[in-house]
Structure formats: structure tokens, C-alpha cells
Image: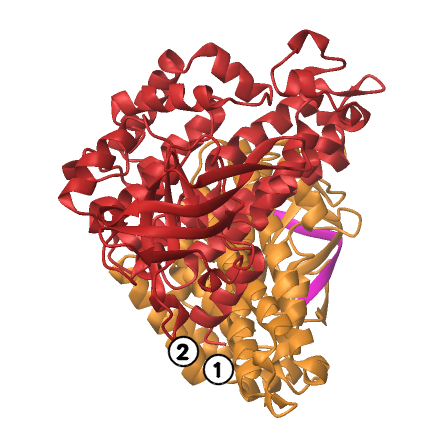
Amino acid sequence: MDLQYTPEQNQLRESVERFVREEYDFAHRRKLVASDSGYDERCWHSYAEFGWLAVPFSEDDGGIGGDATDTGIVMEGIGRGLLLEPYLANVVLAGGMLSALGSAGQKAQWLQPMMVGAHKLALAYAEPASRYELAHCETTARREGNGYRIDGRKSYVHGGGAADFHVVVARTSGESSDCAGLTALVVDAKAPGLEVRPYATHDGSRAADLVFEGLRVESSRRLGEEGAAYPALELAIDQAIAAIASEAVGAMSTLVDMTLDYLKTRQQFGRPIGTNQALQHRMVDMYIALDEARSMALYGALMLGEADAAVRRKALSATKIEIDRTARRVGQEAVQLHGAMGVTEELAVGHYFKRLSMIGVTFGDMSWHLQRHAQA
Amino acid sequence: MDLNLSPDERAFEAEVRAFIARELPRDIREKVRLDRHLEREDYMRWQKILGRKGWFTGTWPREHGGQAWSAMQTIIFNRIAGEMHCPELQVFGPAMVGPVIYTVGTPEQKAEHLPAIRDSSVWWCQGYSEPGAGSDLAALQTAAEDGGDHYIVNGQKIWTSFAHHADWMFCLVRTGREAKRQQGISFLLIDMKTPGVEVQPIRMMDGRHYLNAVFFDNAKVPKRNRIGEEGRGWTYAKFLLEHERVENANLRFITQELQKLRRVASEVRIDGRRLADDPSFMADVSAVEVQFKALEIGLLRTLSDMHAGAPAGPGKSSFIKIRGTEIAQRITELLVQASGPDALRYQPGPLFGHNDDALIGPAHALGPVATYLFCRAMTIYGGSTEVQKNIMAKHALGL
């Protein structure tokens, strides 16, 4: 048992934290939220230069051979500063599918250019009727000529507006809830037959819904075997759970810092409000929750390597359940302890709270994961 | 990073498992498994078996006859002890007064007490709380007056766990009236057979007797039974608290009760359907299970930090105590819920082991309410949750 970061990981941690501190202040973020794209293209290229976009990919695939704890370090920094660039969408979601299923040629065509910032990717798997069930897929890919014809709808595609290519999960066989029969295909964002409907989410990030009507894609754009994409999809979403768990830890740690600072400086009745025991104990609860979240984000990242998928599923559900519980506690308490300022647009607190709240309904909410945990 | 046990730790785990399987007396195991009341003799018999192996004081350094267990080994031992229905160990000797004696005791004190703690031939109790000194321990009033080569002790302790079983007590007494209350306190070892020491039982709401009031009426305690310097008892008591970290997590108890909860859920039928297949009940079980996982990983992180030479960080043992007790309490609630209406029957005969034949209803329903009631004390003893939060607010958050 060893739960210490390596010197290289500490370096990565410091460089991410420095970037967040020095290059990404809240005024800058505010401008980006209001901009057309919703993120900073210059920052994205910096991430590519720093190697952050290549972190979890093997050296054979052109990556730097990091593991999920390394991705967690980057994601924690993203959470700490509430960074808006589509890291999760590119590196963890679409990148996860390509690295699990893609051939060497497909990785060279789509994964490696992403790592250097040459183009962007997104993963389209969820649908209007799927809620959190990964196997639920009504979008079809029917054999046609030497390729497929895709029809259907995809929802909440993270980073979907910015993507140049979508990894689309579509059904090539079976009923709409079967695990078997799902196939992953890479499609051009500008291909005829695809309509991208981008929107902002409550936390200031961007997503899109996609409508496919007779989109044609060649067989060479299929990732892996036909009908066999489900295990890779499940793994990619488990990886995404570990990643947003670390992001939540980063966001919670900022809220704990801000709230503690506020308790020490805000004066009422002639003394700092932090001298009130009622508030001290709530602050302690937040502090404990943050530490528990940190434990579970780490646990989730470490359990991603587990070979038994049932054990892995249970562990990642445990992570998500605890992240949601602690994020709710820390987010709500941070708002409450900031008083009226906590509910304003002006203060960063509300923006962190919004991100944490949206994490709660991403990749399975608490009830969904409690059931998956109990069944595993 | 990795969460896996080292080959040595895995070997230790196998050794613990094999030892318990071989050595834990069947009657004791069944009492623990079925929530029956344990007698003094039950605890002592098991602790003596462990003592012969050197495992009752496994965490002690080798120079004092221990096994120099790492914190990880302690965790492994507790976890398996919980899985295999071992009794709770009485930690007052091995985890509390023992380390104080081997750290600051005289050679005579070490020679007299350490062997008897190691082999569990002596039962220790802790004389800290008083009627006027609960959370505010430094307010204690029990006085030790100078009588030459001895002290004359007068006063009262309360909430003393198992004082009625104990041979010796380690006790905080007031030897001075310094302005700073913590300065006038001394740490005494008191033979419970001393004339003038009287133990009175306090019955608890679960019907059992484990707490007591202890009265001192001109009890003569030799000065050679004082630990360290006069007036520095508070320092030693604080040192002792440092040794509670792993125990604070309640690993053995939580492991045991969670396992029981899963077993009961698979036995109980609702209209022919297993409770274990009820999604809403099992969601409650999962919710507490994952909180236990967070506690476990938090503990491992602390140990890993300490191993790497970093301090555990202020408030860590408070944090572990707060969560370890809350989680344990939650599981006891769920066990009552799992037993359902069968939990209603109060059956002291079987519960206290007097008349096992009289048991009405399923065996699993006998214990949960008593355990639930008993465990409400967890967030009160050893520094209540609120006191722990005060400590954390001050030392970890600077409030």
C-alpha cells in the first residue's frame, strides 16, 4: 500500500496549480462563459504544449503513459479553477473510446492530433430516453454499401459544439436496451445528415444534442468489432466518473478555502462570524467531507485498473455516491455560510456550487449508483 | 500509488486468519456472532490466547515485548477479527495505559505492569470522567493529598467502563491548585482492591451493565504508582490519546456489523422476497458501506503519509473518531430496521446468556436493539462528536 504521489506527479500537480493560479483568474473565466465558444483556444493549446492532453495515453499511442491518478491531478486543477476547456470530453471520454477500441491507424488519424491540439473530439452516447443507462441506445447504424447509415438522436454531448469529430455509439443489432449490438463510429461534425445543436449548461460549460438523419459513414471509421463497443463504453464512463470525482475535489477544496477565509474575515456583532460554534461545526463538516471526497477520488482512480469489471463498477459507483454526497454538503454549506453574497452572480462561490450540482447529475446520479453498487 | 497489500502483509493476513480459525473458542465466537452478552471470563480467555502469541500487544515495540506491528497490520488484524467474530478487545491496557507506562514509567512500574498487560492477566479501567468533568475533563476534582510516601485520594469518577471487572485503574487526579487547571493534574495507577475504593454499577438503557461510578474515600495510593512527574498528568493523558487513532475507526465493529447486516438481509423474507432484493433497503446499506470505504481509505492515506514521514495533520484522529462512530451507529440502525417487528422482543434471558432455550423468534433479531441502544454512547464517549469538532475547528482550521 502506497498512497503517496511520485516526484513526477508532484511536479505535474504544481504546474497545474500554477497555471490555474496565474493564468486563469475569475474575470477571465467570466469573459469566456459569455463568449461564443465558451472556452479559451489559447489555453487549450497551452494544455497541448504542457502535455496534459496526452496524459492517460500509452507511449505506443503517442501519449505520455500516465495513469488515472495523473488524469486526476489535471482534473483536480480544472476543478480548482473551474476551467472551461473541454478536457473531459476530449481526453477522457472520446479519448478513452479511441484508446480502448481504435486501431493504430485510427489512433494516428484521430487520437494523436487531439493530443497536440490539432482537432477536437467528443463522445456521443447518451440519448433522450436513456437517462443513465449506457446500454439504452435507439440510434441505429445500418449496414449500407461499404459502410453504415446512422439515424437517431444523441443528448448531452460534452464539448459537442466544439468537436471536429464525434465518436458515436449506435446500435447495429439487438433490442434498445441490450449491451450487445453497440458499435462505435467516428463521424465528421460537418458531415451531411448530422445536425449539431449546441447549448450552454448551468455551470457555464458547453454541450450539444445531435440529430442524425441518414448520415453515411465508411466501415473504416468503425472502432473495434461491430456490436462489441459496450465494455469500452462502460470503462470510458467509469474513467469519466473518476475524472469528475477529482474535478469535484478541486472545486470543493476551493470552496472550503473561500468559506474558511470568509468565516475569519466577515464581521458581525463586532467579531468574526467564525467565532460562532454553530458555524465552526459546519465548517468542520465541510472539511471532513472534502477529505472523504479526496479519498474516494483516489480510490476510484486506483480501482480503474481492476481487471474484474464487476469489482470496478462497484468501486466507481462507491466513488460517485460519495462524491455526490460530499459535493452537496460542501456546495450547499459554502453558499449558506457566505450568507446573501453566496447566492449572487458576482461571487465565485455560486459558480462552484453550480458546477458541483451539475456533477451530481452527470454519469449517473446518487440513486442510480446506489442501485448499481447494491447489485454488484 | 497502489492499494494492494505487500507480500509480507498478505502473509500476515493469512497468518491471522489461520490463527483465529484455530484458536478462537467456538463458544465465544458464537456469543459474538449471535450478539450474546460476554462475561469478563470470555474477554480474558480470548485475550490470553492472543497474549500467548504476543498479539494482544502486537503494536508495542519489540523492546517492550510487542510485535512492532505497523498500523497496516493493526488494520488487517481488526478487519479479520471483525469478519471472524472475535470479541472486542479491551484496549485500556494494551492501547492506552501500556504505551504510557513503557514511555514514561519507571523500571519498577514497567516490570510490574507490562508483562501483566501483555498476557492479559490484569484488567485495566480508565478513571477520567467525573460528575462535573465530562467534555471539560480539566475540571476534574478528585483530589490526591500528599501523605508522605503515598497519596490520600478522595472523590468520584463516573462512566468508568468495566470498573467492576477491573484489577487496576489509571486515573487522573488533582494534586495541585495551579491557576492553569491542566497543570495540577497527576496520573496515578490505582489497585482496585485498595481500601476506600468502591464501585457502583450504572444500569444502561439497553439493560446491561458496563459502566460504573467509582468512589474514593481516603484511598491510600503509594507514590511509586504515580506515572512521571507530579502535576504533569495532563501531558501523559494527551500522549495517550495519540495512540487511539486506529482504534478510533471502529474497524472491527463496523466490519462485523456490516457482515451481519448483509447476512440478516439475505435471511429476512418480505412476502417471500429476500430483504436483500429490496432496492430501497439495499440502497441504504450501500450508502453506509461507501462511507465506510471513504473512512478506510482516509485512514490508509493518513498511515501512508505518516510512513512517508509527513505528520498526520491536526485533527486527523478527531475526524476518524467522528466518522467511525457515526458510520457504526448508522449500521446499528439498519440492523434494527432489517429485523423489523421481530426486533421488538426484549429477551434478557437469551441476551445475557442465562436461558438460551427460551428464545422466541429468529436468532438475528435478539441483539440489534440492544446494540443500537448501546452504540448511542459511541458519539458521546472518548470526547463527544461536538468536542471533536471544537478540536478540529481550533487546530485544523484555526477558527
Amino acid on which disc 2 is placed: Phe
Q: Identify the chain of the residue marked 2, using the numbered disc in the image.
A: A
Observer-nearest of A85 and B98? B98
The residues bearing labels 1 and 2 have C-alpha atoms spaced at a distance of 7 Å
Viewer can see residue A206: no
Image disc number at residue A19: 2
Q: Which residue is mark 1?
A: A24
Give the amino acid type for the residue marked by disc 1 in the picture. Tyr
* Labels 1 and 2: the sequence-earlier one: 2
The chain that hosts pointer 1 is A
Q: Which chain is orange?
A: A
Which region is colored magenta?
Answer: A205-218
Q: Does residue B275 appear in this view?
A: yes
Q: Please check the rendered image and state whether residue B50 is part of the magenta-colored stretch, yes or no.
A: no
Report the residue at 63% width, 32% height from top: B371
Badge 1 vs badge 2, beta-carbon distance below 8 Å: yes
In the picture, measured across the screen, residue A263 lies left or right of residue B83, that is right
The hue of chain B in the figure is red
Q: Could you tell me residue A213's position as x and y percent?
A: 77, 54
